[in-house]
Image (cartoon, rainbow, N blue to C red):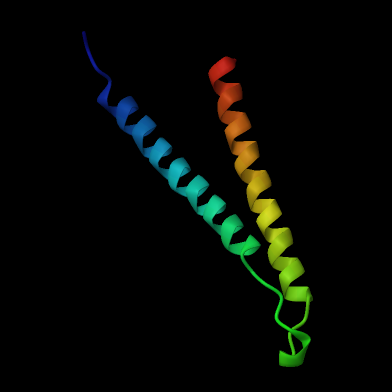
Amino acid sequence: MKIDWAALGSVFGVSLVVTVALVGLFTLGIVGLSKQAEPAAQGGSGGSVLLARAGAYVCFALCVAAVAYGIFLIVA
């Protein structure tokens, strides 16, 4: 039995990078959803909250797409 160490290392490296990227995207989504509107008395505007929420939804959509693609690769 011969192990192709280069292929094993490549799979490990790609898996590590994709895992860190997916966790980072999910973390950005959580941070975006945690933004709270500042009271109008402090001069806060709702625009930054809406932008953060939209960015969070984009991050979650990318996470779902990456997981769906991974399942597709496993099944196909």
The N terminus: image quadrant: top left
The residue sitting at the top extreme is 1
The one of 34 and 24 positioned closer to us in this rendering? 34
User: In the visual, does 34 lie left or right of 44?
Assistant: left
Q: Nearer the viewer, residue 52 or 19?
A: 52
Q: Position of residue 50 (x, y in %)?
A: 76, 67
Q: Residue 44's image quarter?
A: bottom right
Give coordinates of residue 9: x percent, y percent: 31, 32
- Furthest toward the left, the residue is 1
Give the total of numbered labels.
0
Q: In the displayed structure, does residue 35 sit left or right of residue 14?
A: right
Q: Judge whether 36 appears above or below 28 on screen.
A: below
Q: Nearer the viewer, residue 36 or 61?
A: 36
Residue 19 on image: x %, y %? 45, 42
| Residue 35 vertical placement versus 20 (above, below) | below
> What's the residue at 41%, 36% (across, down)?
15
Identify the residue at image location x=43%, y=44%.
17
Vertical arrangement, residue 62 with respect to residue 6, above or below? below
Q: Residue at x 61, y 65 (%)?
A: 34
Residue 3, quarter of picture: top left
Q: Is residue 69 above or below residue 43?
A: above
Please state, as top left, top right, bottom left or bottom right, where the C terminus lies in the image. Answer: top right
Where is residue 69 shown, x and y percent of the image?
61, 30
The answer to which quarter of the image holds residue 7 is top left
Q: Is residue 63 left or right of residue 52?
A: left
Q: Nearer the viewer, residue 3 or 62?
A: 62
The residue located at (60%, 43%) in the rendering is 63
